[in-house]
Amino acid sequence: MVKNGNKNKGRSNYSSRNLWSGFLFGLGIAAFIDETVFHQLLRWHHFYDKSTTGIGLISDGLFHAFSWFATIGGLFMFADIRRRNALWITRWWGGLFIGADGFQLYDGTIQHKLMRIHQIRYVENVIIYDLIWNILAVLMLIIGLSLVVRTRSRQQPDKDASHEHQ
């Protein structure tokens, strides 16, 4: 258990764990939202659209399972760093943005354009969807990176919520 006087040292020791917890949670949530909204509710595409609908549904199920493993893993790490009084919330949010929007940028560039395993939506002007998807990803990725850089350059994160157990 980290003592109150050693709160900053505890946070420093768990700096990468804060980042990875946020990253996994962000990745999982972004994948979950993508799969739920675009695959299930809107039915714009499947994770893998180069085969039959049945294969597409199986790929969606595997993708959904992956998203939950990442989300749950991130939450277990979050609970651990919080239990140790080492939660550095700004750094955690930075990791969340990097994970979520790193996933979104990877999906929009690698999976949609390079691998062509699916598109956002199968319409005439897909470029509009691609631009919105990728520009939003880059903007939010910049937010995440700026949060992480800000926490890296500050040895004593005095403005973060401590979440200490009394």
Image (cartoon, rainbow, N blue to C red):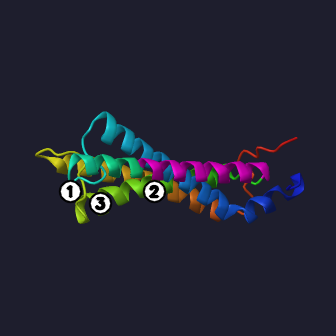
Q: Amino acid at mark 1?
A: Lys
Q: Quick check: is 69 in the magenta stretch?
A: yes
Q: Residues within 10 Å of mark 2 (few under 14, many from 20)?
A: some
Q: Could you tell me residue 63's position as x and y percent?
A: 40, 51
- Closer to the chain start, of discs 3 and 1, is 1
The amino acid type found where label 3 is placed reads Gln
Cα separation, mark 3 vs mark 1, equals 12 Å
Q: Callout 3: few (<14), some (14-19), or many (20+) C-alpha neighbours within 10 Å? A: some
Disc number lying in front (3 or 1): 1
Was residue 119 drawn as part of the magenta stretch in this picture?
no
Can the viewer see residue 159? no
Can the viewer see residue 118 in this picture? Answer: yes
Disc nearer the start of the sequence (2/1): 1
Q: CA distance from mark 2 to mark 3?
A: 21 Å
Distance CA(mark 2)–CA(mark 1): 33 Å
Task: For the N terminus, give its image quadrant.
Answer: bottom right
Residue 76: x and y in percent read: 66, 50
Tell me the residue that label 3 is attached to: 111
Q: Is residue 3 left or right of residue 110?
A: right
Compared across the picture, whether 136 is left or right of 146 comes to: left
The residues colored magenta run 64-85
- The residue where tag 1 is placed is 50
- Judged from the image, the secondary structure of the residue bearing numbered disc 1 is loop
According to the picture, the residue beneath numbered tag 2 turns out to be 142
Q: Secondary structure at mark 3?
A: helix
